[in-house]
Amino acid sequence: MKHDFKELKLDRVTRRFAGSGGHVFNALSELTLTIRRGEFIALLGPSGCGKSTALNCIAGLLPLSGGTIRLDDERIDPLPPERRGFGMVFQNYALFPHMSVMKNIGFGLRMQGVPAAEIAPRVAKAMRLVQLSGQEHKLPGQLSGGQQQRVAIARAIVIEPPLILMDEPLSNLDAKLRLETRAEIRRIHRELDRATVYVTHDQDEALSLADRIVVMKDGVVQQIAAPHEVYAQPSNLHVARFMGYRNVLHLTVRGERGDRVLLEAPDIKLTGVRKQPLAGSRASVAMRPEEVTIATGPAAENIITGRVDNIEYGGRDSLIDIVTPGGTRLHLRGPTDVALGADVHVHVPPERVLVYPYDGSEG
Amino acid sequence: MSATPTVVAELPAPHAPFDRALLLVLPATVFMLALFIYPFVYGLILSFEPAQGGWLANYQKFFTTDNLWTTIGKTLKLALPATIINVGVALPIAYKMRVRSRWQRIVTTLLVVPITLGTVLIAEGMLTYFGPKGWLAQFLQLTHIYEGAIRLTHNYWGVLISLVISGFPFAFLLILSYVTGIDPVLARAASTLGADSKAQFRHIYLPLLAPGLAMCFCLAFVQAFSVFPSAVLLGAPAGPTRVISIAAYEAAFEQYDYSLASAIAMIMGFVQLVIVAFVLSLRNWFYKGPVTGGKG
């Protein structure tokens, strides 16, 4: 088992499951990804998208149906989990209930045959790293959720794994603790200088933690890119929807110039940026509520008129819904003094109107 | 239903009104008193009222008569090995059966079938199969695998085999339920930390199962210690399988000495109690809390 590495290479990693009635489905299709030392990778997607399957395949808890995994030059996908030596943090922590905090954290070292005299200082160091000193002799059942979480992290990192795998580690914590632990995970990652693969369905977690985000849907990778790119330039409509582009309109294409596209509906005229090659006369556009604003002065293009239909007060600003005369609903963020029922003009810059091939499906 | 606000139910006043739900334990209490406590106390008192001699005469007779006191040893010699075999064999099989598979249901069904057969039926079957002219003996001699005389009935071995057949399914089902109650994520976590399947069993499953195994051992032992029909039908009830229940039966229904029979039953209960208390005291060495690894 190695502690140091340059890169972990996933090559067309595939996992199939037999569903009911002999029907076979791909939980994970041809995931190809190279993880370099020091990187923080987030696997992001809704439940059932294959992100946990990918993590379990890397850990060795699920055999592959196809593809290979290499750690530098060594092929590791035929190895059982105990010979890969990747640290893993489970969603429900999976602490050993009959062992004290110290024994839990020292378990991996014991299994590797590290001499007892060496285990104690290493456990103490890991406990300091996750700020758990003083809890050595408690059983997991006597700890709070946040403390259990930190024991799970300490247990995974004390074996100095080349790769740390985390499966939605924050989903059982309350909002405040989640923010604190998130910062802590990032700090620990920096201090260890190994690599982390982090599974989450929460886009905020992925954006704030990761160096690169892998967005997945139905077992298929949709986009692999840095957080700012996934946020601002989603590669397809699915990623856009998942990253908070709540306004998706289906419009008719009137013309294309360069990557600019002119689109139309009876009561809407929009210019946008083409993100994927278009086919046919219809296209779908995606816009973030934050980037649609209430127009104050005259603007040349991309003005939509509508009536305020709903207001959700949000403190700094409000989440406003407007409905166009043709019945199209738009979400936007605006000042808190807008009145319900008022007629407003809203504006969105053309470069923030992302145009994708027509997709009539919802959600 | 009274119109008492629910707040009162949640925060009882210093003088909480009598909770009528407690009345629900009444039938069970009556049942226990009439069918367990009373007969037990009656038997205990009866055992101190011998037909002849002082109040301890029955106990003196038991521990000074050769074909009485030796029954304790003979019964233990059957019950302890049978229990150890049942628990010891059921554990690895139940451990293997913990993961859902195609074979799980078939194997479990096959192993559990004997529990539906009575002891007498098992004894009849064994006489036909294991007897000197039984199928097993005929098969072994026909195929020249073993040519000597095969004696597996009407002796110690016959009773031991029957105790294993009738006691195994019980131990297996009990242990299977303990094993499947342990969160499999714990073993997966252990494997990512370098524990192979042997180490997972030793460090995760065994310690978490220990309290359940102790309980299973006690129940299986009590069941085996009270062996009666198979000791008569398959054993040598005048010799090596003269178990303590046979001694009690003879005292009660052949000599009509109910007082002596009660004393034997009391001694039998006491021996069981000693073993059970010993095994359960071992449980205190182990962790006894919930067997999951955190928030669900």
Image: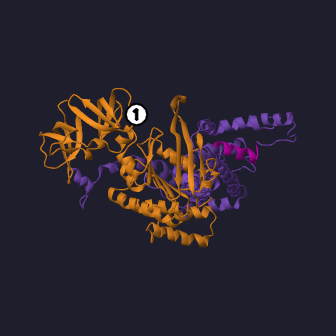
Chain colours: A orange, B purple
How many discs appear? 1
Quarter of image, res B12 = bottom left
> Seen from this angle, which residue lies furthest top?
A280
* The residue stretch that appears in magenta: B154-167
Residue B164 inside the magenta-drawn segment = yes
Residue A180 in the image: above or below residue A286: below
> Splitting the image into 4 quarters, where does residue A46 fall?
top left
**Residue A299 on image: x %, y %:** 18, 42
Whether residue A183 sits left or right of residue B277 in the image: it is left
- Element on which disc 1 rests: loop
Q: Residue at x 75, y 51 (%)?
A: B240
| Percent x, y of residue A48 | 44, 40
Locate the N terminus of chain A by quadrant.
bottom right
Q: Is residue B61 above or below residue A54?
A: below
Residue A171 visible to the viewer: no
Q: Is residue A215 left or right of residue A32?
A: left
Name the residue that disc number 1 marks: A277
Q: Quadrant of the C terminus of chain A?
A: top left
The answer to whether residue A277 is left or right of residue B257 is left
Residue type at mark 1: give it.
Answer: Pro
Residue at the (23%, 35%) spot, across then down: A329
Residue A30 % position (x, y): 53, 40
